[in-house]
Image (spheres, coloured by chain):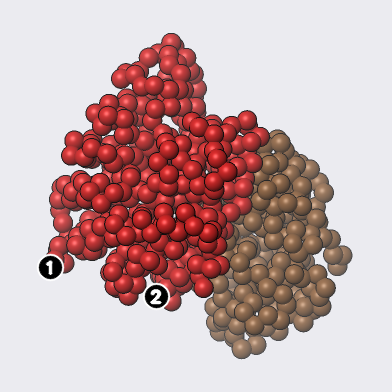
Chain colours: A brown, B red
Amino acid sequence: MTHSKRLGIIGAGKIGTAIARVAVAAGYDVAISGSGPADRIALTVNVLAPGARATVTEEVVRRADLLILTVPTHHFRKLPRDLFTGKIVVDAMNYWEPIDGDDPELAAAPYGSSPVVQEHFRSARVVKSLNQLGYHEFEENRRGPGSLDRVAVAAAGDDPEAVARVLQLIEHLGFDAIDAGDLDAGIALGPDGAAFGVAYNADQLTGLLWPENSSNAERSDERTDRGATVRTRLDRADLKKLASGAAP
Amino acid sequence: MSNPSDDDTFSPTGHGFEFGLDSFGEHATDEKGRRETDAGAVRRIVDDAVLAESVGIDIFSMGEHYRSEHMDSAGHVILAVIAGRTERIRLGTSVTVLSTQDPVRLYAEFATLNAASSGRAQLVLGRASSVESFPLFGFDLADYETLFEEKLDLFTRLLRDQPVTWSGTSRAPLRDQFVYPAIAPDAIPTWIGVGGSPQSVVRAARYGLPLMLAIIGGHPSRFVPYVELYERALGQFGHPRLPIGMHSLGMIADTDEEAQAVHWPTYESVMRIRGGERGFPPPTRERYEMDVTEGALFVGSPETVAVKIAAAARDLHLSRFDLKYDATDAPVVAQRRSIELLGREVIPRVRELLAGRPISSAEARA
């Protein structure tokens, strides 16, 4: 697998700029876009995420294979369905009825918002992640590999390579990366989910996400419930190797 | 509005650092633990504001919610009653949900409040964290950005430059329209309330309006980049430096232990409900104590709270601090004691601390 350190962020709000800031600190080449022209967010990006490049969405998508989608949840359908063809898209959004208003499709979605996002962007490889923690917790909790108080962040997706890339990103950003399983399992990472809103360490988060075999979950890549196919993923040792020299 | 000196904190009104109390219209309990009635809550809030004036607090502000726990659905009416029972305290909103208000009606109400109170009306405009006004008044939350932008444009024109000719998508157009009572341009201080959206910070700067930071989680110093963004954006838009304020939750008692003992049960039950609606796990005492010592809760003795306010004021270049003092089912006596301590002990102490050497947040935590 090639390791590109280019990252694209769609959405220049508080979450998008916080992720941009952390990614720049982790050595990523970051481009970020808002809903309009680049000059509308230039000052914001310059102050809140110095080192990231403020540009337009088309350019963000063109220059990176790994993209983070963090627009207001009720706005993602305004983006063209084929915008992310072939790209890995991290759905960092949460659906909150009190914030986003009533969205019948998302409210009724049995496995949270990410399968709905994947259905909209069919030609993209969607991974649910980076949505578990508030933006300031996300920033305050990043640590180098091996730190005793390192916080864990999970990723859920159907495409093994895409999930592996996101797990690698998580490690680079300063967190222990936990494979949460397929995209449907991403519901555990969102509002009302077992893993939402609290900064857990790797063992705690693994136990919450894989309760039936938490003892060996660190090396287990297999997942058979919820209809997911059995597959193999990078184990944590490989992730550590990939992350070495690059994490903060 | 005068230009700033090189002092870190300044006030456009020349009053120095200003202190406000915010009420979200929540019910208190009596000495037997009984919750007051809805009507009783409304009347008691007026009494709280009268007390606030008597202990030297500068501003009393009402929130805007449409929920069973909040009696501030028509806070402007409460402010008008307070105006009739007070003489000096300024009367405002902790946040007016502008997107679901009619700017013409809002102007008329605040120009009238300003007249009735002899120039004491002001307000904060924002989104607020509650959005129940959207379905209630027939607005689509998806239109939030357009609604806010258009209505802010119209409202600032009504404040600054009448007659107004205006057209947009959110209401009927106006042509050479005067709305009465007349006020002098910018006579009603209007702040923009921001909870962490960088676009909202830039918008406040673009309109040349002062910035009110709603800081209800995390260490206040995490807003330092937003302050820098605001100050640089003001410069870019050619505006002078403008005031920055902060709104946070808290309670003051004679000791830290007493303040937490009164505040924790009400905080716990409110956060259990409101956090639960957003999918967060219930709050824990451990996390609460972190928020008190390291985070955005201003709960404690007068000295504890004063040191914390002074540190935030230095970090964030503040000239205004508003304490949201009411808390569902907190005893009336505890809330009134909190108001007294804010006015009589915290305010003088913060002014003393700010007059001296800057105290950084690191020192305040030590």
Disc 1 secondary structure class? loop
Q: Is residue B128 visible?
A: no
From the viewer's perspective, tell me whether residue B329 is left or right of residue A4.
left
Badge 1 density bin: few <14, some 14–19, many ≥20, Cα 10 Å: few
Q: Is residue A55 visible?
A: yes
Tell me which residue sits at (38%, 59%) in the image.
Answer: B349
What number is the disc on residue B32? Answer: 1
Tell me which residue sits at (69%, 61%) in the image.
Answer: A22
Residue A106 lies, with reference to residue B260, above or below; the image says: above
Residue A77 lies, with reference to residue B119, above or below; the image says: below
Q: Amino acid at mark 2?
A: Arg
- In which chain is the residue bearing label 1? B
Tell how many labels: 2
Residue B16 lies, with reference to residue B103, above or below; the image says: below
Disc 2 secondary structure class? helix
Q: Amino acid at mark 1?
A: Lys
User: Could you say where residue B59 lies in the image, as x and y percent from the top left?
Assistant: 33, 44
- Same chain letter for marks 1 and 2: yes
User: Could you say where residue B156 lies in the image, as x and y percent from the top left?
Assistant: 46, 27
Mark earlier in primary sequence (1, 2): 1
Extreme-bottom residue of the structure: A215
Q: Are marks 1 and 2 in contact (CB under 8 Å)?
A: no
From the viewer's perspective, tell me whether residue B345 is left or right of residue A78.
left
Q: In which quadrant of the rendered view does residue A88 lie?
A: bottom right
Circle 2 is placed at which residue position?
B285
What number is the disc on residue A203? Answer: none
